[in-house]
Image (tube, coloured by chain):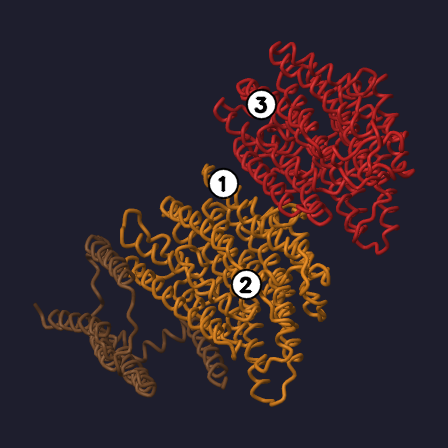
């Protein structure tokens, strides 16, 4: 029953949120309901056994409403559950027109995300996959920046193309199953020839690659991140891209083992190219938001590559990095938003000396930034270490090339800190102040999580251990 | 060759030629007159098939009433001049090719339809087309379609009244 | 006295009684309250609908002229429910209309025709009921009496439907000539393979159906007729009359021409491809929202044909399910459009800019309906399309599924464009807050529940599937 609650809580509270008239009530309602979801997610994560739920849905078609929760699902539902209240707190002072719809749509997104991480039935999975997308379309195109309409259109059409390819793939696999079923187990038990696997592999992979995004399917992402309202950007980059990675681990690699061996190399090379490419572009970015967006592409590239090396170390690294990257990137967005709020600009060239005006913010940013370049003692270190280890075992050359991106990450991250927070104040930063208490509290919580998981990553490793054995 | 055959071919030729004339005459009044000739030819066919009632009804209703109405309309609207707008030559060509292909297919299909080759029309049995038999079958086996037709006429009338009254 | 007749034909009888009642009322009284006429009709339709779910007889009357079973009853119920929704939605327009009683008489005659058509097991019966379901519609299309384009629509509809009936009639007469019978069952057993004339007869009948469901290349009448007709008639044409013809199409294809399955499979696949692509490409460039929905409904027919191509129970069930969903979604969209057009006269897509600002409920209704038409979860349209594609895939035509998927993307583009106009764009001349009367409000709530509920509740598909068997 717990998996159902994880979907039901945000779904119901999201729908109810539309009926709230008052802005403040909407905020409080959203915050409390998301906290309730965190409690449920924690209970789920702490329970030692795998959880599942199963009910009849479309019996003639062999589709069931079945949810399953192993370690990876537990971790990602926990991430989804935690990130929403964090987002709500950090943007508590932001004001939105029609805020009831804004929060309602966000909560619906959460319900969709939860469903994606929980479903063990292909049709249900697709259903939630799309459910998570639609509210985001409205969120971005109603509350986004100036160029929001065109950008969101591109984003939506892009991901929809991917989704439909996946749908075609699902139908294809369904017709191949012996028991005419959409269940994950039946898909695992398929005996497909190499060429059949290749078709299915590419249909699924493109859908997931657009979502992650992997080079060369990434073009929607920086624009979408830049134009979305910050709260949505946090969800997009913190949680939503994990849908793609999760789906690769759960729905792609085990279903098409032969095709993965066949095309794994190609995917890894694409990912590594993407890492370097995104890092190089990030160095040249002047806009803080775009910089974080490209840095995110680089990180995702590494995670994707580490899945396809097909060894347990890389996979384990990817899994715990999904969680850590979510936490870190949300922290970075909060800082970026705080900077924009204080100074009215996101251009690095127009900023400087913020540390003199807002020392606390600066310290918090530095910790977040260090986590972004995966320094030891931060949470990202252990994940990146494992992933590079896996990559190294697979192919030294590729690992070495990918390693360059760590250096590049240090370059652009430190450069950003240097130019935004240190040096002399300029006209725009002269009147800046510390950001409000909500933002600071959220960031402090995040920093504590970052350091705690950096020193003691055991809980995450424990959670994902069960998944690796299968 | 019996008289029936000769009559059949004559009526068929008359029907086809008149139909062509309907299309090709420039004057709408002539078209209508040729159309009446078509109906007469068809009625002749009905008689050949022993469908006397149908033949008479066809003449009375179509050739008589409806065509007279047509004539009235055409004359009242003063359409008897050659006012037909010129159509695009390509459209004409496309139409001719399409219709020609259809005709070709039709002829070849009927020509090679083996299932038709031994079927003769029931002509000996003379009473099948009589009103009595027609009425019997219409009110027993075909009573539902008959009633549907009546509702169809009713609704067509209602529609016509509404549209006709609009000014 | 055989009570059997009354029970088996209860849909038809109630509708026929309603028609007669309206006729008597209209003839008998000068000053007729429109509200009264509408209420009486709606009440009787509702009664028929309720009765349709409670009394579920099965059997034949009048030889093989009239056959009814659970599946036929379901189809009739769907049509009656759809007509009821349209009637509720039209009340804004009909309130001050001078020919309300006539409107209902004609509308119900077509509904009667459709009910008979679904139950017919004889080509003569089928043809007559098809005519009954189209000829009054042409008169209805002209019911915007002062508008020239409405007359144009009526004329185009009557001519195209006469032409298609002609084709179909030619096909039926060939069929009669080669088999010597018109009964569905006897024709089905008399049909042989490799008889060109019968195949040609089938092609002609197929073309006749193609006209009625406006499949490409028989679609040319659709856009002008939809644009010119009053909105209520447009929605009736695009949903109910199309649905009814498709229901019969299922019977004719799967039962009568079952032997030709391998031939009509390719015919349907090709027609469905063209229908999807051309419908979509034309929908892309429309600015009038009624024309837009006309073309989008053409492309929806393309998807339905994919489902039909499967040729099994599953595909029959998926088509019927899709039609249910399609009725809810399309009527949801048309309901809003009817309201806007009735109160403001605006019917361009650009007029809907900033619509959300003043009309929240209507915007959500239209938005949900459009998302459902685009086939995006969680609304029912997705499940409808999904089942269609699934049954199309049963014969292994994966390339067809791929093309359908591409078309879904294209269609998403234009549906989203309308959604964008409603929710996101701002305009100085956006439509004021519109008052919604009680009847359209009920219709709208039914549509929303239908669009959302019929997808999530898997039982509906199961119900249809069991009846098809």
In the picture of the structure, the residue carrying the numbered disc 3 is A270
Q: Colour of chain C?
A: orange
Residue A133 pos. (x, y %)? 67, 41
Q: Quadrant of residue C85?
A: bottom right
Q: Is residue A364 visible?
A: yes
Q: Nearer the viewer, mark 2 or mark 3?
A: 3
Q: Are marks 1 and 3 on the same chain?
A: no
In the picture of the structure, the residue carrying the numbered disc 1 is C401
Q: Quadrant of residue A114?
A: top right
Residue C429 pos. (x, y %)? 67, 65
In the picture of the structure, the residue carrying the numbered disc 2 is C290
User: In the drawing, does residue C189 fall left or right of residue C368?
Assistant: left
Q: In front here: B138 or A131?
A: A131
Chain to which the residue tagged by mark 2 belongs? C
Q: Is residue A254 visible?
A: no
Colour red belongs to chain? A
Q: Secondary structure at mark 3?
A: helix
Assess disc 3: are there few (<14), some (14-19) or many (≥20) residues with their C-alpha within 10 Å of its C-alpha. some
């Amino acid at each position: 029953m717990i998996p159902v609650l994880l979907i039901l809580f945000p779904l119901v509270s999201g729908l109810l949120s539309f009926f709230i008239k008052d802005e403040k009530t909407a905020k409080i309602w959203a915050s409390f309901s998301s906290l309730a979801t965190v409690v449920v997610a924690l209970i789920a994560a702490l329970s030692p056994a795998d959880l599942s739920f199963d009910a009849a849905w479309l019996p003639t078609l062999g589709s069931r409403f079945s949810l399953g929760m192993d370690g990876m699902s537990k971790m990602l539902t926990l991430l989804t559950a935690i990130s929403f209240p964090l987002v709500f707190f950090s943007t508590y002072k932001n004001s939105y027109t029609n805020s009831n719809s804004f929060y309602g749509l966000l909560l619906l997104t959460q319900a969709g995300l939860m469903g994606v991480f929980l479903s063990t039935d292909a049709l249900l999975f697709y259903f939630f996959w799309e459910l998570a997308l639609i509210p985001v379309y409205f969120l971005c195109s109603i509350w986004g920046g100036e160029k929001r309409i065109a950008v969101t259109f591109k984003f939506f059409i892009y991901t929809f193309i991917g989704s439909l390819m996946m749908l075609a793939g699902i139908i294809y696999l369904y017709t191949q199953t012996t028991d005419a079923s959409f269940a994950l187990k039946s898909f695992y038990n398929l005996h497909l020839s190499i060429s059949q696997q290749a078709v299915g592999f590419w249909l699924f992979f493109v859908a997931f690659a657009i979502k992650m995004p992997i080079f060369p399917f990434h073009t929607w992402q920086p624009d979408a991140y830049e134009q979305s309202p910050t709260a949505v950007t946090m969800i997009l980059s913190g949680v939503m891209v994990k849908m793609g990675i999760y789906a690769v681990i759960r729905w792609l690699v085990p279903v098409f083992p032969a095709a993965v061996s066949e095309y794994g190399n190609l995917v890894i090379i694409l990912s590594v190219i993407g890492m370097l490419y995104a890092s190089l572009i990030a160095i040249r970015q002047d806009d803080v938001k775009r910089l974080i967006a490209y840095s995110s592409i680089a990180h995702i590239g590494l995670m994707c590559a580490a899945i396809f090396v097909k060894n347990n170390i890389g996979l384990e690294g990817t899994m715990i990095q999904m969680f850590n990257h979510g936490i870190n990137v949300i922290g970075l967005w909060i800082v970026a938003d705080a900077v924009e709020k204080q100074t009215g600009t996101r251009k690095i060239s127009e900023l400087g000396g913020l540390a003199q005006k807002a020392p606390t913010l600066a310290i918090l940013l530095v910790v977040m930034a260090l986590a972004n370049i995966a320094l030891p003692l931060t949470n990202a270190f252990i994940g990146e270490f494992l992933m590079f280890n896996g990559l190294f075992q697979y192919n030294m050359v590729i690992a070495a090339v990918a390693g360059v991106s760590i250096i590049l990450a240090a370059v652009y991250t430190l450069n950003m800190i240097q130019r935004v927070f240190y040096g002399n104040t300029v006209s725009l930063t002269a009147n800046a102040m510390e950001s409000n208490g909500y933002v600071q509290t959220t960031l402090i919580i995040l920093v504590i999580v970052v350091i705690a998981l950096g020193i003691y990553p055991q809980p995450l490793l424990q959670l994902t251990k069960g998944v690796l054995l299968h | 060759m019996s008289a029936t055959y000769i009559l059949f071919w004559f009526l068929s030729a008359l029907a086809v030629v008149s139909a062509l004339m309907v299309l090709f005459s420039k004057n709408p009044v002539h078209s209508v007159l040729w159309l009446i000739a078509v109906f007469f030819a068809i009625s002749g066919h009905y008689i050949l098939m022993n469908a006397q009632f149908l033949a008479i009804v066809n003449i009375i209703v179509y050739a008589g009433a409806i065509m007279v109405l047509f004539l009235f309309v055409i004359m009242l609207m003063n359409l008897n001049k050659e006012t037909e707008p010129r159509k695009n030559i390509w459209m004409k060509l496309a139409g001719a090719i399409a219709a020609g292909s259809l005709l070709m297919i039709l002829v070849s299909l009927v020509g090679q339809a083996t299932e038709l080759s031994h079927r003769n029309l029931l002509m000996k049995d003379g009473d099948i087309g009589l009103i009595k038999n027609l009425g019997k079958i219409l009110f027993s086996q075909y009573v539902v379609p008959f009633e549907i037709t009546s509702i169809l006429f009713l609704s067509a009338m209602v529609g016509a009244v509404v549209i006709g009254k609009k000014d | 006295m055989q009570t059997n007749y009354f029970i088996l034909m209860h849909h038809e009888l109630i509708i026929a009684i309603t028609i007669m009642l309206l006729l008597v009322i209209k003839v008998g009284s000068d000053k007729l309250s429109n509200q009264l006429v509408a209420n009486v009709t709606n009440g009787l339709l509702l009664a028929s609908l309720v009765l349709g779910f409670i009394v579920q007889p099965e059997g034949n009357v009048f030889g093989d002229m009239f056959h009814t079973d659970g599946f036929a009853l379901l189809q009739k119920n769907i049509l009656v429910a759809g007509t009821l929704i349209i009637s509720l939605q039209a009340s804004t327009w009909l309130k001050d209309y001078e020919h309300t009683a006539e409107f209902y008489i004609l509308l119900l005659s077509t509904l009667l025709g459709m009910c008979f058509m679904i139950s017919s097991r004889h080509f003569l019966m089928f043809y007559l009921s098809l005519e009954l379901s189209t000829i009054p519609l042409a008169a209805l299309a002209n019911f915007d009496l002062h508008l020239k384009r409405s007359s144009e629509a009526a004329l185009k509809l009557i001519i195209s439907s006469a032409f298609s009936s002609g084709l179909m009639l030619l096909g039926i007469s060939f069929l009669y000539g080669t088999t010597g019978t018109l009964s569905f069952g006897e024709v089905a057993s008399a049909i042989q393979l490799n008889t060109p004339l019968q195949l040609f007869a089938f092609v002609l009948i197929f073309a006749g159906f193609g006209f009625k469901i406006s499949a490409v290349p028989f679609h040319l009448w659709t856009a002008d007729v939809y644009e010119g007709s009053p909105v209520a008639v447009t929605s009736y044409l695009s949903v109910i009359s199309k649905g009814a013809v498709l229901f019969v199409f299922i019977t004719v294809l799967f039962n009568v021409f079952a032997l030709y399955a391998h031939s009509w499979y390719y015919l349907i696949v090709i027609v469905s491809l063209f229908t999807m692509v051309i419908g979509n490409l034309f929908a892309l460039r429309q600015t009038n929202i009624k024309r837009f929905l006309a073309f989008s409904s053409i492309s929806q027919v393309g998807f339905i044909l994919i489902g039909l191509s499967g040729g099994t129970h599953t595909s029959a069930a998926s088509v019927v399910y899709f039609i249910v969903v399609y009725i809810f979604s399309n009527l949801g969209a048309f309901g809003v459009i009817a309201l806007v057009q009735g109160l403001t006269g605006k019917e361009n897509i650009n007029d809907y800019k900033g619509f959300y600002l003043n009309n929240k409920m209507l915007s959500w209704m239209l938005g949900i309906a459009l998302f459902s038409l685009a086939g995006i979860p969680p609304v029912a349209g997705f499940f409808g399309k999904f089942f269609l594609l699934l049954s199309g895939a049963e014969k292994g035509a994966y390339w067809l599924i791929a093309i359908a998927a591409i078309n879904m993307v294209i269609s998403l583009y234009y549906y989203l464009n309308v959604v964008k106009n409603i929710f996101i764009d701002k305009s100085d001349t956006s439509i004021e807050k519109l008052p919604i009367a009680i009847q359209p409000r009920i219709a709208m709530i039914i549509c929303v529940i239908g669009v959302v509920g019929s997808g999530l509740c898997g039982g509906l598909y199961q119900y249809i599937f069991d009846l098809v068997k």
